[in-house]
Image (spheres, rainbow, N blue to C red):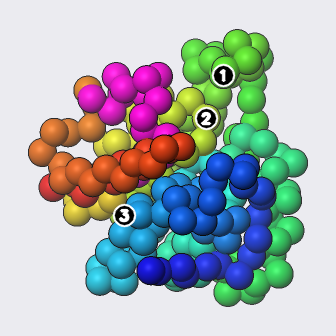
Amino acid sequence: MIHHKSGIKIGNRCSKHTPDIMGTNEEPWMTRDSINWLYKYLKKNNNLKTLLEYGCGSSTPYFLSLNLHVTSIEHNKKWLDEVSNKINTFENYIKLWTPILKELTLEGDEIGSDNECYFDDYVNEISNLENFDIIIVDGRCRSSCIKKSISHLNKNGIFIVDNAERAIYKDAIDNYIPKDWKKYVFPTKVDTTIIWIKS
């Protein structure tokens, strides 16, 4: 069983998210089998170098520890500062990390779950960036992030959606992610992570 860890503890896990089914706070907060699969795949395919994540956290130092260039789009300044304070103690990680803060606005099209603030800048920031070898959608407004980011994945790249079992993401997953992409589903009783490889 693979348990590569970043060496930096970020965030907490609820009691149901035990290490046998979910990543610890030194790993991505995704299903255990998806983390292990991804670790082995990245070790075999070391040509994959650039990663974008919607939402930073324990996944950030984990992927930095695998020598990936990580770009994190985050909406919460307090949380980004907390993650930054921990990552900044590792000089090698700082060189590989590009954090981007895109705070909420009071007007827009991409409404948040509170029905009061908007995530337009957060969702659309990828339009200002280069394409990536790996894209992880695990933050806010995931359906919109799927739709916006799917065209920014390099050929043979990896696309990941966590909590993919949620009905709210079904339309974006079914209708925007190409059917010919190879698909790996990693379900647990608390979460499902899906990984696609772009053909």
Tag 1 residue: 112
- Please, what is the three-letter code of the amino acid marked with disc 3? Asp
Q: Nearer the viewer, mark 3 or mark 1?
A: 1
Give the quadrant of residue 157.
bottom left
Tag 3 residue: 133
User: Is disc 2 in contact with disc 1, using a CB cutoff of under 8 Å?
Assistant: yes
Q: Mark 3 or mark 2, which is nearer the start of the sequence?
A: 3
Does 74 sit left or right of 166 as displayed?
right
Q: Mark 1 or mark 2, which is nearer the start of the sequence?
A: 1
Does 112 sit left or right of 12 as displayed?
left
Give the quadrant of residue 4.
bottom right
Looking at the rendered image, the quarter that the N terminus falls into is: bottom left
- Please, what is the three-letter code of the amino acid marked with disc 2? Arg
Numbered range of the magenta stretch: 159-174
Indicate the secondary structure of the residue bearing disc 2: loop
Confirm whether the magenta stretch covers residue 163: yes
Question: At 81% across and 50% down in the image, what residue appears?
Answer: 79
Indicate the secondary structure of the residue bearing disc 3: strand
- Residue 122 position (above or below residue 56): above
Tag 2 residue: 140
Does 61 sit left or right of 37 as displayed?
right
